[in-house]
Image: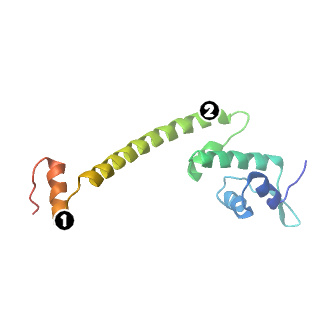
Amino acid sequence: MEQLTISQVARQVGLRPSAVRYYEQKKILPSPARVSGQRRYGIAAVQRLAVIRRAQEAGFSLDEIRQLLLGVGPSAPISARWKKLAAAKIAELDDRMERIRSMKDLLERLQTRCTCETIEQCGAGILRNSTGRWRALH
């Protein structure tokens, strides 16, 4: 089995060696064997890093990636984990998109409707519009 240096592994997956070391530190990538004190990796490390990269591209956090990879093996197929995490991430993204749409709508209304001259006018208008009527502050 071919043993790769950290630089070779990093280059194959488009990472810096420091990122590979970081993933080891975070227990997302198993610590490799060492030869004369230098890290040596097999192809499994390259493949695992490819999965990590793809998960990051899909927006998964390192904690979510750790959940994805935890205990993966022949008796625990990764496809079921992908599906479960993907469903949760899609729901999270749907919520974010709805919030972004609301923010955009508010900004567009402000851009076209705001005629306030002072911060006080602006605050009064916000209070009036948020409650449907003027609300005194005490």
Which label was assigned to residue 109?
none
Left of 13 or right of it: where is 135?
Answer: left
Identify which amino acid the numbered label 2 is placed on. Answer: Ala
Quadrant hosting residue 38: bottom right
Q: Position of residue 93 (x, y in %)?
A: 47, 42
* Marks 2, 1: nearer the viewer: 1
Left of 96 or right of it: where is 111?
Answer: left
Left of 133 or right of it: where is 88?
Answer: right
Secondary structure at numbered mark 2 = helix
| Residue 70 shows in this picture | no
Q: Position of residue 39 (x, y in %)?
A: 82, 61
Secondary structure at numbered mark 1 = loop
Q: Position of residue 4 (x, y in %)?
A: 85, 55
Please give the name of the residue rendered at 79% of the width and 46% of the height, measured from the top-left corner: 44
Which residue is labeled 1 in the image?
117
Left of 22 or right of it: where is 47?
Answer: right
Quadrant hosting residue 77: top right
Residue 108 vs residue 54, the one in the foreground:
108
Q: Position of residue 53 (x, y in %)?
A: 67, 49
The answer to whether mark 2 and mark 1 are in CB contact below 8 A is no
Identify which amino acid the numbered label 1 is placed on. Answer: Glu
Please give the name of the residue rendered at 38% of the width and 46% of the height, measured from the top-left corner: 99
| Residue 34 shows in this picture | yes
Please give the name of the residue rendered at 70% of the width and 58% of the height, measured from the top-left corner: 24
Nearest to N terminus: mark 2 or mark 1: 2
Which residue is labeled 2 in the image?
80
Q: Is residue 44 above or below residue 83?
A: below
Please give the name of the residue rendered at 20% of the width and 66% of the height, measured from the top-left corner: 119
Residue 132 vs residue 26, the one in the foreground:
132
